[in-house]
Image (tube, grey):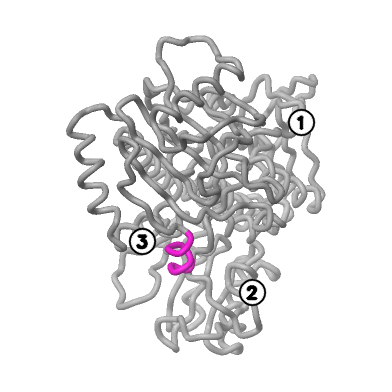
C-alpha cells in the first residue's frame, strides 16, 4: 500500500515520518524549489515537541530554541499584566514553550525523514488529482501520472487536494492587515520576554528569537494601514514598524541593524467541513487556518499528522477497515474548531477600538489574567497538553475518581527501566502495568490485533496508575485507549471494535 503526500512542510513531513516508521510506502512532493529559509510560525509548543520526540525528529531543537521566559501585556504603553511563562509551564510538567523558527523545525524533520529512507521531490507541483474506489491519481508538473492508494493534502490554505476532493473551506478573512519583520535590532528590552502593546492606534507584538547565542534578533509585527493594497517593500515595512514601535510601545530605544526578512499578511480563519472524502484526506493548513495569536497553527497541523499516521498505517496494512479513518476527523476537527474560535476571539479582543473593549482590557484583563488559576488554564490551552478525545468515537465520557479517561493524554510517566512514557513510545502502542509479567501478558494479547512489533510492555517507576490492579493501553499518540482491571481479553474486544468499526462504543 502506498501514500502520496502533497506538501513538505511540518505537517507533511511529520505524517511522512510516521508512515515510514510503520513500513508504509510514501512519496512526498512539493511545488517549492527547495526548503524554505523563512517562516511565519515561530513557536513550538510542548505538545508539538512531544510529537516530534515520539517520531525521533526533535533532534537539537531544544538547544537551538529560546525558551519563552515571560509574557508582558501593555495598554496605552502601561503594563497591565506580566507573568512567568516558563515557571508556569514547568510546574505543570509541560516543558518549555520554545521560540524557534519553522525553518529549523522543518530541517530537523527532513533529517529524520532521510534517516528513514525518504526523499522529498522538490519543484514538483500537483497539476490535478482524482480518485476511484481503489486508489488515487495525481498528475505532476513533471508529466508523471502517479498512482497511489491514498492521497493526503498537506499543501496549505490553497490546497489542490482539498479542492480536488470538493471539500468546503468555510470561514472569514479579517479586515486587519499586519506588517512583520525578523530583524536584528538595538534595544534594551529583555530578550526572553514576549511583549504585546495595545494602543488606540493599533497593536505591536515583539517576540525574541534565537540566533546562535545572540540576543538581538526579534520578530516585530503591527497592524498596518488598510488603504495600502500592494505589497510593501522591505524598507517600507521597517520604516512603518519603527514608527509604530515609537508611538505605541515603551521600546523607545529601538533601532534596526539588519533584517532577515519582511512581509505582510492578513488574518484568515477557515475550517474544512470534513477532513476526508474517499481516499483523499487533508491535514494542517489545508484543513484549518487560524489567527497567529497563541502560535497554534503549525502545532495543530503536527498533531493532525501524528493522529492520521498511525490510523492510516493500520488501514494500509490491512489490520483495520477504512472506518478507522473517520475517527481522524472526529478527533482532530474539534481541536481545530476550538483553536479557530479561541484565537479569533483573542484577535478581536486585542484589535478592537471599542471603548468597552479597552475598559475590559485594562480592567478585567489585569484582574483576571493575573490570577494563577487563569494562567494555568492559559498554559494548558496554549501548550495543547489538555487536548482530549474523550468525546470522540474512541473515547469515553465515563466519570472516574481520578486519572485519565479513555481519549485523554496520559501523563509522561517515569518508567522503572529509565526514561519516560512519551520518550519511548516510538510510534508503538504501550501496555502500562505495575508489574512486568502483567504488562507482558496484556501486551501479548494486544499484539494479536496490532502486530508483534507494535506493542511494548512498560512498568512505571511511581504508582501513577489510578489503581494498582489496573492496566492501561496507551495509543501511539500518547492518549489512553483502555483502562481496565478485567482480564486481557478486554483489550482484544476493544481493539476488534476499533479496527473493524472505527468506534469502541
Residue appearing at x 60%, y 88% in the figure: 436
Q: Which residue is mark 1?
A: 34
Residue appearing at x 53%, y 83% in the figure: 433
Q: Which residue is mark 2?
A: 456
- Quarter where residue 134 is shown: top right
Tell which residue pokes out farthest to the left in this image: 356
Majority SS type along the magenta span: helix
State which region is magenta. Answer: 86-93
Q: Secondary structure at mark 3?
A: helix
Q: Which residue is mark 3?
A: 376
Placement of 481 over or under 187, stated as above or below: below
Residue appearing at x 48%, y 66% in the figure: 90
- Marks 1/3 in contact by CB < 8 Å: the verdict is no
Q: Is residue 502 left or right of residue 23?
A: left
Residue 90 magenta: yes
- Looking at the image, which is closer to me, 334 or 57? 57
Amino acid at each position: 500500500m502506498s501514500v502520496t503526500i502533497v506538501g513538505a512542510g511540518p505537517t507533511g513531513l511529520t505524517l511522512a515520518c510516521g508512515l515510514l516508521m510503520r513500513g508504509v510506502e510514501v512519496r512526498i512532493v512539493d511545488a517549492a524549489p527547495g526548503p524554505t529559509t523563512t517562516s511565519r510560525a515561530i513557536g513550538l509548543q510542548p505538545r508539538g515537541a512531544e510529537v516530534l520526540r515520539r517520531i525521533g525528529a526533535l533532534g537539537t531543537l531544544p538547544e537551538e530554541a529560546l525558551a519563552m521566559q515571560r509574557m508582558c501585556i501593555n495598554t496605552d504603553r502601561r503594563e497591565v499584566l506580566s507573568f512567568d511563562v516558563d515557571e508556569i509551564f514547568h510546574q505543570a510538567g509541560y516543558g518549555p514553550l520554545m521560540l524557534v523558527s519553522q525553518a529549523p523545525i522543518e530541517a530537523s524533520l527532513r533529517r529524520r525523514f532521510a534517516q528513514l529512507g525518504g526523499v522529498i521531490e522538490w519543484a514538483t507541483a500537483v497539476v490535478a488529482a482524482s480518485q476511484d474506489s481503489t486508489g488515487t491519481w495525481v498528475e505532476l508538473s513533471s508529466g508523471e501520472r502517479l498512482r497511489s492508494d491514498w492521497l493526503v493534502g498537506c499543501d496549505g490554505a490553497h490546497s489542490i487536494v482539498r479542492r480536488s476532493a470538493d471539500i468546503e473551506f468555510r470561514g472569514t478573512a479579517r479586515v486587519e492587515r499586519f506588517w512583520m519583520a525578523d530583524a536584528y535590532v538595538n534595544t534594551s528590552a529583555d530578550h526572553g520576554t514576549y511583549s504585546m502593546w495595545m494602543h488606540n492606534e493599533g497593536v505591536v507584538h515583539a517576540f525574541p528569537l534565537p540566533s546562535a547565542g545572540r540576543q538581538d534578533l526579534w520578530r516585530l509585527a503591527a497592524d498596518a494601514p488598510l488603504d495600502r493594497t500592494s505589497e510593501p517593500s522591505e524598507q517600507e515595512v521597517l520604516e512603518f514598524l519603527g514608527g509604530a514601535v515609537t508611538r505605541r510601545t515603551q521600546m523607545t530605544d529601538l533601532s534596526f541593524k539588519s533584517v532577515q526578512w519582511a512581509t505582510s499578511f492578513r488574518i484568515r480563519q477557515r475550517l474544512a467541513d470534513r477532513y476526508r472524502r474517499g481516499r483523499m484526506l487533508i491535514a494542517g493548513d489545508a484543513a484549518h487556518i487560524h489567527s497567529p495569536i497563541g502560535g497554534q497553527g503549525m502545532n495543530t497541523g503536527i498533531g493532525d499528522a501524528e493522529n492520521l499516521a498511525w490510523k492510516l498505517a493500520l488501514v494500509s496494512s490491512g489490520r483495520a477497515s477504512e472506518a478507522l479513518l473517520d475517527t481522524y476527523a472526529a478527533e482532530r476537527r474539534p481541536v481545530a474548531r476550538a483553536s479557530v474560535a479561541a484565537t479569533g476571539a483573542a484577535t478581536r479582543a486585542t484589535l478592537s477600538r471599542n471603548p468597552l473593549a479597552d475598559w475590559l482590557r485594562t480592567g478585567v484583563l489585569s484582574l483576571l489574567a493575573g490570577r494563577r488559576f487563569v494562567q494555568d488554564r492559559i498554559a494548558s490551552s496554549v501548550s495543547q497538553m489538555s487536548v482530549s478525545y474523550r468525546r470522540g468515537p474512541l473515547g469515553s465520557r465515563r466519570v472516574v475518581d481520578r486519572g485519565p479517561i479513555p481519549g485523554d493524554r496520559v501523563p509522561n510517566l517515569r518508567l522503572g527501566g529509565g526514561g519516560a512514557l512519551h520518550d519511548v513510545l516510538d510510534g508503538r502502542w504501550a501496555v502500562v502495568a505495575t508489574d512486568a509479567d502483567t504488562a507482558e501478558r496484556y501486551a501479548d494479547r494486544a499484539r494479536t490485533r496490532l502486530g508483534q512489533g507494535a506493542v511494548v510492555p512498560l512498568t512505571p517507576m511511581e504508582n501513577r496508575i489510578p489503581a494498582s490492579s489496573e492496566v492501561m493501553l496507551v495509543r501511539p499518540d500518547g492518549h489512553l485507549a483502555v483502562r481496565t482491571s478485567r482480564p486481557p481479553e478486554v483489550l482484544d474486544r476493544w481493539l476488534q471494535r476499533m479496527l473493524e468499526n472505527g468506534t469502541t462504543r
